[in-house]
Amino acid sequence: MFCEKAMELVRELHRAAEGRLPAFNEDGLRQVLEEMKALYEQNQSDVNEAKSSGRGDLIPTIKFRHCSLLRNQRCTVAYLYDRLLRIRALRWEYGSVLPSALRFHMSAEEMDWFNRYKKSLATYMRSLGGDEGLDITQDMKPPKSLYIEVRCLKDYGEFEVEDGTAVLLKKNSQHFLPRWKCEQLIRQGILEHVLS
């Protein structure tokens, strides 16, 4: 059936929960591209035949195939664009290092795009705020307080706070630290925010 494989790619992303990245469906994408190539070749031969022998009865078939080609193209672009939006959101959520489970679901081209986006964002952040730059990935939501209580989930070692004080982060230890210094470690799963 025309465009079924392309629609399945879109359905696959729609079924995935918001913020999750399903595995890249290389086989499905290849099948859609092969279908598009076959439709294009059939259209080319019918167009040549319609021109040479003046067969007007082929025009509706040619138009139908052309509409199928356009629909396959729209579905493929929607699939790839939605994946890029999800990958971009992962950079803001997890930071510059993605967990291996997420990297496993990405194609080589998507990993390349992620690395270029990461570098571009880092360059932009260095251009803000003077010599040290400004990390715009921190405080995605306005904080209610500047310091938070955190519990260490893994042994991390020494962690230096802005005033030069070193804090030893050991498993199950609790600390009262500046929010902006902890957010990246919370996203990485090293610390957890203790809610009173």
Image (tube, rainbow, N blue to C red):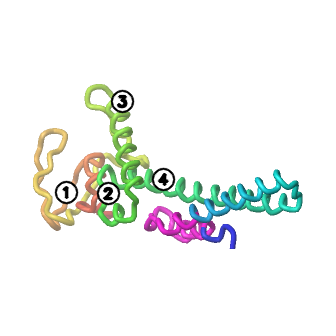
Quadrant where the C terminus is found in the figure: bottom left
| Classed neighbour count for the residue bearing mark 1: other residues with Cα under 10 Å, few (<14), some (14–19), many (≥20) | some
| Classed neighbour count for the residue bearing mark 2: other residues with Cα under 10 Å, few (<14), some (14–19), many (≥20) | some
Foreground residue, 119 or 73?
73
**Mark 4 residue type:** Leu
Instruction: Point out the frontmost of discs 1 and 4.
Output: 4
Q: Earlier in the sequence, mark 3 or mark 1?
A: 3
Instruction: Point out the frontmost of discs 2 and 1.
Output: 2
Under circle 2, the secondary element is loop
Q: Earlier in the sequence, mark 4 or mark 2?
A: 4
Q: Tell me how far mark 3 sits from mark 1, CA to CA.
A: 30 Å
Q: Residue at x 45, y 67 (%)?
A: 22
Image check: 50 left or right of 73? right
Quadrant where the N terminus is found in the figure: bottom right
Q: Tell me how far mark 2 sits from mark 1, CA to CA.
A: 26 Å
**Marker disc for residue 101:** none
Image check: 47 left or right of 105? right
Q: Tell me how far mark 3 sits from mark 2, CA to CA.
A: 24 Å
Q: Residue at x 13, y 63 (%)?
A: 155
Under circle 1, the secondary element is strand
Q: Are marks 2 and 1 in contact (CB under 8 Å)?
A: no
**Mark 2 residue type:** Leu
Q: Residue at x 26, y 26 (%)?
A: 131
- The residue labelled by disc 2 is 98
